[in-house]
Amino acid sequence: MMVKFKRWKLVGFLLFLLILFDTDFCCGRRTRQTESMLEDFDIGESAKFPYLQYGAEIQAKIKSSLPRFAQPIPNVTVTIGKDALLPCVVDNLRSYKVAWVRVDTQTILTIHQAVITRNPRITLSYSDHRSWFLQIKNTHESDRGWYMCQINTDPMRSLMGYLEVVGK
């Protein structure tokens, strides 16, 4: 077992050096020199790059552990003066934050549990760290437009819903 560990450690170190000093290798092309150095170890092809073998699997696990939207944000139609409620449902939020933004004015309305805007008609309600509801009370015609729910992942994830405000 110790021999295998030392071999992997040596292969890993050599791979690090190759990437560091061999621009052809780091750019996706292996040179003849690189090939001969790896062949000296006489290990299987899949064992030459153990990090690449598991890289896709690890990326898939990381991606599946990131927050995601459980459903689209519906377009909502309300009559002037009535309240509008836009839902944003997020699975696996963990320590990430949700924000609501008014798209056309690029105004941040809420960040996580705090209302940022000074508009007293805008409120936020949430439940189970999963459902985030933007509520616009006593809607005005000027409230019509796109609203975006964002999750602060890298890259940011977002969904939009349209609020239509119609006359009485």
Image (cartoon, grey):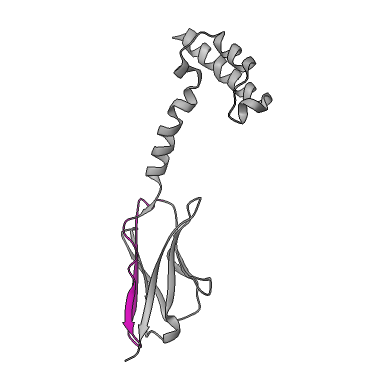
> Which residue is at 47% across, 16% downward?
45
Q: In the rendered view, would you say 30 is above or below 118?
A: above
Rendered-image quadrant of the N terminus: top left
Q: How many marks?
A: 0
Question: 25 or 60: nearer the eye?
Answer: 25
Magenta segment, which residues? 70-94
Residue at the outermost bottom position: 168
Q: Magenta stretch containing residue 87, yes or no?
A: yes
Q: Is residue 120 left or right of residue 73?
A: right
> Which residue is at 49% across, 13% downward?
5
Hey, which quadrant is residue 134 in on the image? bottom left
Q: In the rendered view, would you say 107 is above or below 121?
A: above
Question: 130 or 166: nearer the eye?
Answer: 166
Estimate the x, y position of residue 82 in percent, counting from the top left: 32, 85
Rendered-image quadrant of the C terminus: bottom left
Estimate the x, y position of residue 42 in percent, counting from the top left: 51, 8
Q: Magenta stretch containing residue 81, yes or no?
A: yes
Q: Is residue 137 visible?
A: no
Question: 94 or 100: nearer the eye?
Answer: 100
> Which residue is at 44% across, 59% downward?
158
Hey, which quadrant is residue 78 in on the image? bottom left
Estimate the x, y position of residue 31 in percent, counting from the top left: 63, 20
